[in-house]
Image (cartoon, rainbow, N blue to C red):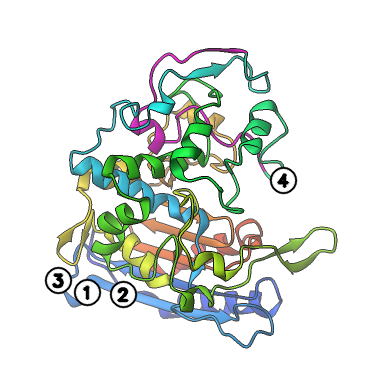
Amino acid sequence: MAPAPHLDQDALQTLHRTIAARVERGELPGAVTLVARVGDSDDSDSGEQVDIAAFGETAPGSGHPMARDTPFRITSMTKPIVAAAVLAMVDAGVLELDAPVDPYLPELADRRVLKRLAGPLDQTVPAERPITVRDLLTFRLGLGMNGAPPAIDPPIPINLAAEERGLVLAQPEPRARHAPDEWLRLFGELPLLEQPGTRWRYNVGSLVQGVLLARAAGAPLEDVVEEHILGPLGMTATGFSVPEEQARRLPAYYATDFTTGKLTRQPADPWQTWAKPAVFPSGAAGLISTLDDYYAFARMLLRRGEHEGRRVLSAESVTLMTTNQLTPDQVAEAPFPLDGAGWGMGMSVTAEGRYGWDGGWGTSWCNDPDLGLCSIFLSQTTDVIFNGTTAEFDALARQAAV
């Protein structure tokens, strides 16, 4: 990566005006944004140039402005952090990418596979091989979301069985009510949708990664992620639960009510839920974080696994995370929400080599290694992912880096 050039101030002002105008029009209550150019190291004055801005309020009329340190439910932006923790365990020699998960997750040994996607659960064939660690990271374990909004869980037998067991395989909330061992026991009762390694399906791989990490380390998932990722990166405001003072500051969650066409506050777990440990910490969507904390993670990836002179991930693991792992046919057949992009480990990867991921409650992150560019957009309004707000932000951020 070339040394970081300056950020274009005129382009940044255009970006700021654009987001401010969306807030003024009532498209979202508020947001915080980051655009940064990152050099290969932080050893020189030119190693990093950052623009941070805050817009609007945490809820309309609340009198609480969005701020640089506002905490957010980052939902699916949890996935890259948990995948990085798995790869840190691979770096440490505890896990092997192509080894079966059976020794740590015996509930997933001897899998059965449905004959038909919508078929009865007792009509199955044997799995041709075990599920591996790589399968979990690349979302090719054989089970995952099999629909798109608004019906991400169509009422077919396997989805009904997952719902009856309270597994919460798709949505961020409500949280799963089972402790990890019981969750995996119930999950292990379900057959797979297809043979391991054959098709990409969203979300479930990250849930299983969380259980794998805890068992491989002999410690709760929260402690494993803290030891390998959050602690080394100084991400002190990130966690599966947070102190009461921080939890009280969580923004309200908004989305358009399609019956009225108006932006409406949506049901969400109260702040008290986030001030105590989760029964089942979700490796798919369970983290709260802040702009600066997530930037520390994104910057570490741009610097090939290093942070302030310390190696957090091997360069090889960063390459795995940020390089498409899917075949062309798997990309073409991938259901929502991959939408034609590739998938590395924990994140999407475009044909141009850009990588990152969104959170369904209104958060978005992208790194462009060719430009040394990081862009982060944090809100709590689902609409921004689908109405072009985050795409526009990302395009304007790129203009500031050219």
Which residue is label 4 attached to? Answer: 150
Say whether residue 78 is left or right of residue 226. Answer: right
Real-space Cα separation, disc 1 to disc 4, in angstroms:
46 Å
Q: Is there CB contact under 8 Å for labels 1 and 2?
A: yes
Q: Is there CB contact under 8 Å for labels 4 and 3?
A: no
Label 4 vs label 3, nearer the camera: 4
Which residue is label 3 attached to? Answer: 43
SS category of the residue bearing label 2 = strand
Real-space Cα separation, disc 1 to disc 3, in angstroms:
8 Å
Give the residue type that dot 2 points to.
Answer: Gln
Real-space Cα separation, disc 2 to disc 3, in angstroms:
13 Å
Report the number of discs. 4
Which residue is label 2 attached to? Answer: 49
Q: Residue 272, located in which quarter of the rendered image?
A: bottom right
Which residue is label 1 attached to? Answer: 46
Is 325 situated above or below 394?
above
Is 362 situated above or below 89?
below
Label 1, residues with CA under 10 Å away: few <14, some 14-19, many ≥20? some
Magenta stretch? 123-148
SS category of the residue bearing label 4 = loop
Q: Nearer the viewer, residue 323 or 255?
A: 255
Instruction: Specify which label sits upstream in the sequence, 4 or 3.
Output: 3
